Image (cartoon, coloured by chain):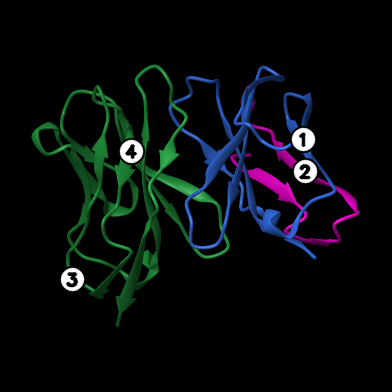
Chain colours: A blue, B green
């Protein structure tokens, strides 16, 4: 299995909702990443988990809360989002933090109303 | 300031024609360099990377890139483009010691039949 699987593929939520994005990989990778990509823009790094511990937080607002319950799973919990948070949220993994190559999922397209 | 620049927002080529996508970087020391491709609605896939050594790098799908230190460039090339190459192409850089890429704004490749 060489895939990074993200669910759901699409999500529409209101500003008062709580939702979660899920990312899963079974390649034995020990580093996992969340990126945010606005339309027609490059991906921007949000969080990095290394060996299930948060190693990088790129000054992301607290309404985004990452969680890495085990080495195969990465969640992004969403609460009280704003319309400007609408974007494609990409998960990636690499064999380790010096893995030299990121494997990306196909993303969750999030719309905040 | 450290930066990566893709000067072309769109490139249009005919199927079978050659392709060159430009990428320039501004870093204190030569960074690690990457090219990623993103098809519509998909995640990113690594085409090739340069860390050191031979300045002409071969990648997947028939792509290659040449690192030119004197020009601070890492241009992507393909001798004959196929319709399936239509996608968004991102040049990315990472400081030495870190493999987490920062992406340029992307170049959209349009292929005419």
> Could you tell whether A7 is left or right of B113 in the image?
right
In front: mark 4 or mark 2? 4
Classed neighbour count for the residue bearing mark 2: other residues with Cα under 10 Å, few (<14), some (14–19), many (≥20): some
Q: What residue would you read off at disc 1?
A: A62
Q: Chain of mark 2?
A: A
Instruction: Give the quarter of the image for residue A11.
Output: bottom right
Q: What residue would you read off at disc 3?
A: B17
Instruction: Give the quarter of the image for residue A78.
Output: top right
- How many angstroms separate mark 3 from mark 4 (CA)? 30 Å
Q: Chain of mark 3?
A: B
Q: Is residue B40 magenta?
A: no
Q: Chain of mark 4?
A: B
Identity of the residue drawn at 33% across and 63% down: B9
The answer to which of marks 3 and 4 sits earlier in the sequence is 4
Q: What residue would you read off at disc 4?
A: B3
- Contact between labelled residues 2 and 3, with CB atoms less than 8 Å apart: no
- How many angstroms separate mark 3 from mark 2 (CA)? 41 Å
> Could you tell whether B106 is left or right of A108 in the image?
left
Q: Chain of mark 1?
A: A
Magenta segment range? A1-30
The answer to which of marks 1 and 2 sits earlier in the sequence is 2
Helix, strand or loop at label 3? It is loop
Identity of the residue drawn at 40% across and 53% down: B105
- How many angstroms separate mark 4 from mark 1 (CA)? 27 Å
Q: What residue would you read off at disc 2?
A: A22
Q: Are marks 4 and 1 on the same chain?
A: no
Q: Are marks 3 and 2 on the same chain?
A: no
Q: Are marks 3 and 1 on the same chain?
A: no
Q: Residue furthest bottom?
A: B113
Can you say whether B111 is above or below A62 in the image?
below
Helix, strand or loop at label 2? It is strand
Helix, strand or loop at label 1? It is loop
């Amino acid at each position: 299995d060489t895939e990074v699987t993200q669910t759901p593929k699409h999500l529409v939520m209101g500003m008062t909702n709580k939702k979660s994005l899920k990312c899963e990989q079974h390649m034995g990778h020990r580093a996992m990443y969340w990126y945010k990509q606005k339309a027609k823009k490059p991906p921007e790094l949000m969080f990095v988990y290394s060996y299930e511990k948060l190693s990088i937080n790129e000054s992301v607002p607290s309404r985004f809360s990452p969680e890495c319950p085990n080495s195969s799973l990465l969640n992004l919990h969403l609460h009280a989002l704003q319309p400007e948070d609408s974007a494609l949220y990409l998960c990636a993994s690499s064999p380790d933090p010096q893995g030299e190559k990121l494997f990306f999922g196909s993303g969750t397209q999030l719309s905040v109303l | 300031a450290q930066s990566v620049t893709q000067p072309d927002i769109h490139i249009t080529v005919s199927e079978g024609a050659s392709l060159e996508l430009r990428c320039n970087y501004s870093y204190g020391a030569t960074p690690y360099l990457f090219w990623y491709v993103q098809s519509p609605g998909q995640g990113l896939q690594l085409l090739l990377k340069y860390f050191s050594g031979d300045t002409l790098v071969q990648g997947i799908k028939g792509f290659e890139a040449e690192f030119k230190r004197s020009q601070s460039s890492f241009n992507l090339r393909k001798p004959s483009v196929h319709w399936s190459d239509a996608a968004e192409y991102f040049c990315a850089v990472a400081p030495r010691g870190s493999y987490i890429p920062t992406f340029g704004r992307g170049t959209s490749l349009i292929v005419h039949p």
